[in-house]
């Protein structure tokens, strides 16, 4: 029985390798040098699909993959459109960690701008997370959806603020932006198709258990 795991190349792929290793699975190809989109492993029943980070939940939901690894940021946005049905989220893998924050130009007076009743223009890839966050603060926002390089928007006067992922803070610093609010911590989760779990219960459980064991030391440190 073949188990297909969808994930994105880059940081998620790299940080997943040790988890696969812990499950006794070695990947045969390197997605950074190979053009293959389906990667074989040394395990005859496990293969990987290399997809865009934002497409991982979609592949799992529509049966293109049995399971996937995706950031909480991506998952929250995906599920906000009402399309999280059939996705089981059993495990936080504690990998690809970062935070999602509000950032503004260093000369922008954020504190007075967010006083109740005011209006703020926010550029972001994370429209659902942003809408919910500012609504909970009672701040009216006009959201501008972008697909990348959010840092530019305040610099060119298109937005007062951005909502984006921050890890070291170097990208913000390099663009004269400052982090003014921490919305939430982000890490990547394992998502499993509920229908695949019914049909391939045993092999999927084996992989889930190995991942749970391998990410446990990190849970212990985080707690
Ligand atoms: O890059 P691409 O457009 O192909 O796709 P993607 O951005 O969707 O994928 P990828 O691989 O960049 O990110 C996949 C997942 O990794 C995200 O959904 C997050 O859950 C997680 N992750 C962890 C991050 C970061 N850390 C991160 N630092 N994703 C993106 N960044 C970016 C951030 O957007 C900003 O541009 O790195 C920059 C900030 O980093 P610092 O270190 O300068 O603060
Ligand atoms: Mg990226």
Image: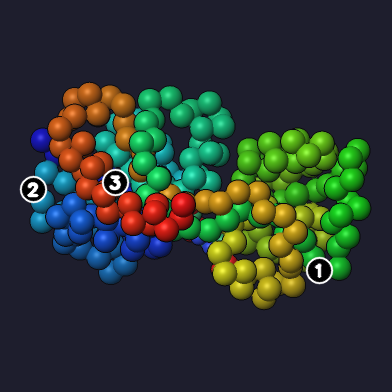
Disc 3, disc 1: CB below 8 Å? no
Tag of residue 98: none
Q: Please state the horizontal and vertical placement of residue 214, each as a whole percent of the image.
A: 27, 54
Q: What is the crowding at mark 2: few (fewer than 14 residues within 10 Å), some, or many (at least 20)?
A: few
Of the numbered discs 2 and 1, the one sitting upstream in the chain is 2
Q: Quadrant of residue 41?
A: bottom left
Tag of residue 106: 1
Residue farthest to the left? 44
Residue at the image position 74 percent from the left and 72 percent from the top: 176
Disc 2, SS: loop
Of the numbered discs 3 and 1, the one sitting upstream in the chain is 1
Disc 1, SS: loop
Q: Left or right: where does residue 101 sit relative to residue 198?
A: right
Q: Please state the horizontal and vertical placement of residue 18, each as a whole percent of the image.
A: 26, 61
Q: Quadrant of residue 134?
A: top right
Inter-mark Cα distance, 2 to 3: 22 Å
Tag of residue 44: 2
Of the numbered discs 2 and 3, the one sitting upstream in the chain is 2
Disc 2, disc 3: CB below 8 Å? no
Name the residue carrying label 3: 212
Residue at the image position 23 percent from the left and 42 percent from the top: 209
Residue at the image position 25 percent from the left and 41 percent from the top: 208
């Amino acid at each position: 029985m073949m188990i297909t795991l969808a994930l994105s190349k880059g940081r998620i792929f790299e940080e997943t390798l040790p988890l696969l290793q812990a499950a006794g699975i070695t990947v045969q190809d390197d997605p950074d040098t190979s053009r293959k989109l389906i990667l074989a492993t040394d395990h005859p029943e496990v293969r990987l699909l290399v997809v865009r980070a934002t497409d991982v939940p979609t592949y799992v939901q529509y049966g293109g993959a049995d399971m996937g690894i995706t950031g909480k940021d991506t998952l929250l946005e995906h599920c906000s459109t009402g399309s999280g049905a059939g996705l089981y989220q059993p495990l936080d893998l504690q990998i690809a960690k970062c935070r999602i924050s509000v950032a503004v130009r260093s000369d922008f007076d954020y504190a007075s701008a967010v006083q109740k009743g005011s209006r703020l223009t926010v550029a972001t890839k994370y429209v659902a997370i942003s809408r919910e966050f500012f609504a909970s603060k009672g701040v009216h926002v006009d959201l501008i959806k972008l697909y990348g390089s959010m840092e530019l928007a305040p610099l060119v006067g298109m937005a007062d603020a951005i909502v984006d992922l921050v890890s070291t803070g170097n990208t913000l610093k390099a663009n004269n932006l400052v982090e003014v609010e921490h919305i939430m911590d982000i890490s990547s989760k394992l998502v499993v198709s509920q229908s695949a779990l019914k049909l391939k219960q045993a092999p999927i459980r084996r992989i889930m258990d190995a991942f749970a064991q391998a990410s446990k030391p990190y849970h212990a440190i985080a707690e």
